[in-house]
Image (cartoon, helix red, strand yellow):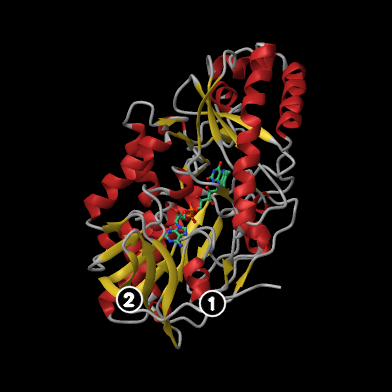
Amino acid sequence: MNEYILEPAINVEVMDRANVLVIGAGPAGCAAAIAAARAGAGRVILAERYNHLGGMATGGQVILIPSLSYKKTMMIKGIMLEALEKLSSIKNGFFGPSRDIMGSEKPSDVEHWKPYFNMTRNEHVCYGGYTDPEIFKIVLQQMIEDAGVIVYLHCWGCRAIGQGGIVHGVCFESKEGRKAILADTVIDCTGDGDIAASAGASFRHAYHDGLRNASLGLVYRLGIEDFQKFTDYTVVDREGWKLHNKKLNEISGFPIVLFPTGQSNVAWVDNWLLGYDCLNVKDLTTVEFRVRRTIFDVIEYVNNNKIPGLYPMTLYDTAYQTGTRGSRRILCNKELSIQDVYQGTSFDDVVAVLPSIEVITVKGGLDEIYPEKPTQIPLGALQVKNMKNLLVAGRCFSSDAQANNLINLIPHCFAMGQAAGVACAVAVRSGTEVSNVNYVEVREELLCQGVYLPDGEK
Ligand SMILES: Cc1cc2nc3c(=O)[nH]c(=O)nc-3n(C[C@H](O)[C@H](O)[C@H](O)COP(=O)(O)OP(=O)(O)OC[C@H]3O[C@@H](n4cnc5c(N)ncnc54)[C@H](O)[C@@H]3O)c2cc1C
């Protein structure tokens, strides 16, 4: 039987007030805050529980940015593209095909990039790549500061304040104790939908075991000799590597895949652990411990077998944040379904267009079916049902489990965040509730911010 105590009521000090308050500074939250500030939303506050910006893309060490393009069309532009361009201009910040060969069908280009996951598609080169998470933190910070966003780190958003479909602000726990930030509009970018759920929004939280977003992970990086040498070896001795790879999965007790990073002598290890719930503290702890327990065994196996390119291997670092791929999906006015993804449904309130990508299943193979057409995200999938001034953006957006599996990756979350930030800014500027915001004005502002939308190219 569960035991309970009753906490005494306390006076909570108001620490600040915002026109737009964004909770969670991952890909969605950073994009939302920057977009809102640039669109003239007034006082934009971004609050984050940890000590850095970027969420999974930095602290979670998820460094693979899959394709932003389809053939010769750059579909995810705006803040995501801007961030990648900044990363590319910094030594070791970004590793991937250059923009000049985006859409190239030249066999030499395609063959060169084929071993790198999601860098080619249907015999053409895509625009995407691998980032350095530490450099990414700094790039995001520069963009946030340049936009004039006010940031509070080390603030854990624990409860929405509000009633009757209006969220007046959010209470935070920090070293200063419990304090509140009041706001005209709120965007929940916690990835887990913490704020929307505490405001009483309905949500789904069920996943199928075969899906990527049913799994957790704790990614880590390894010091190696040279990733290109390793890639060449896997091409030349495909069968030999297959056997080693199988053994490494057995040693770990869950699937692991090695990817390149911006540094030739560092490899990134992604992994997939099933049967855990990212909203359960015991499960989160178990995942952290289970993965760290295996790392030295992986290194020992590689070094004993002198695997070309990987040997001599050392531990470089482990991610600061547990990898949570799927969490609450908050119910909004519209819900993106897997049929919408497969059919490329057009929406009359489209705010983002996402090229299709390949996704790894938890069993280590590729999803057999993935869409050909781009996916449209409607504004309705970010407007929380029965809430007047609350949006969600990022992996907790309104979607069925399978759609969420394909459409919650870093570029997608940047694009959704930018749309949510712009929608809030337009609502604040025009004095309307964001649930009733004028779509035409949102679209105009998104186009001004360089976002790709259907029929939007001038
Ligand atoms: C192991 C792993 C591998 C992946 N591989 C890829 C890949 O190869 N390519 C790809 O594009 N995507 C990949 N993904 C998916 C992608 O990383 C995430 O879906 C994406 O980062 C989600 O962005 P987000 O902004 O919605 O949430 P997050 O990145 O989770 O950011 C949420 C932010 O909110 C903060 N936060 C949470 N709760 C609170 C709170 N209550 N108060 C204050 N702050 C809070 C968090 O600290 C975090 O900074 C992977 C994910 C994982 C876990």
Q: Residue at x 64, y 34 (%)?
A: 293
Residue 341 in view in this figure = yes
* 102 relative position to 402: left or right: left
* 315 relative position to 122: left or right: left
Mark 1 or mark 2, which has the lower sequence index?
2
Judge whether 318 appears above or below 41 on screen: above
Name the residue type under label 1: Ala
* 209 relative position to 271: left or right: right
Q: Residue at x 41, y 67 (%)?
A: 187
Q: Which residue is mark 2?
A: 12
- Residue 230, position as x, y percentages in the image: 60, 17
Residue neighbourhood size for the residue with mark 1, other residues' Cα within 10 Å, grouped as few (<14), some (14–19), many (≥20): some
Quarter holding the N terminus? bottom right
- Residue 41, position as x, y percentages in the image: 26, 68
Instruction: Residue at the far bottom: name it.
Output: 164
Judge whether 341 appears above or below 310 on screen: below
Q: Which residue is mark 1?
A: 201
Q: Nearer the viewer, residue 442 or 424?
A: 424
SS class, disc 2? loop
Quarter holding the C terminus? bottom left
Q: Nearer the viewer, residue 100 or 266?
A: 266
Judge whether 21 appears above or below 274 on screen: below
Q: Quadrant of residue 280?
A: bottom right
SS class, disc 1? loop
Name the residue type under label 2: Val
Q: Are marks 1 and 2 in contact (CB under 8 Å)?
A: no
Real-space Cα distance between discs 1 and 2? Answer: 23 Å
- Residue 116, position as x, y percentages in the image: 58, 29
- Residue 182, position as x, y percentages in the image: 31, 75
Residue neighbourhood size for the residue with mark 2, other residues' Cα within 10 Å, grouped as few (<14), some (14–19), many (≥20): few
Q: Residue at x 49, y 28 (%)?
A: 261
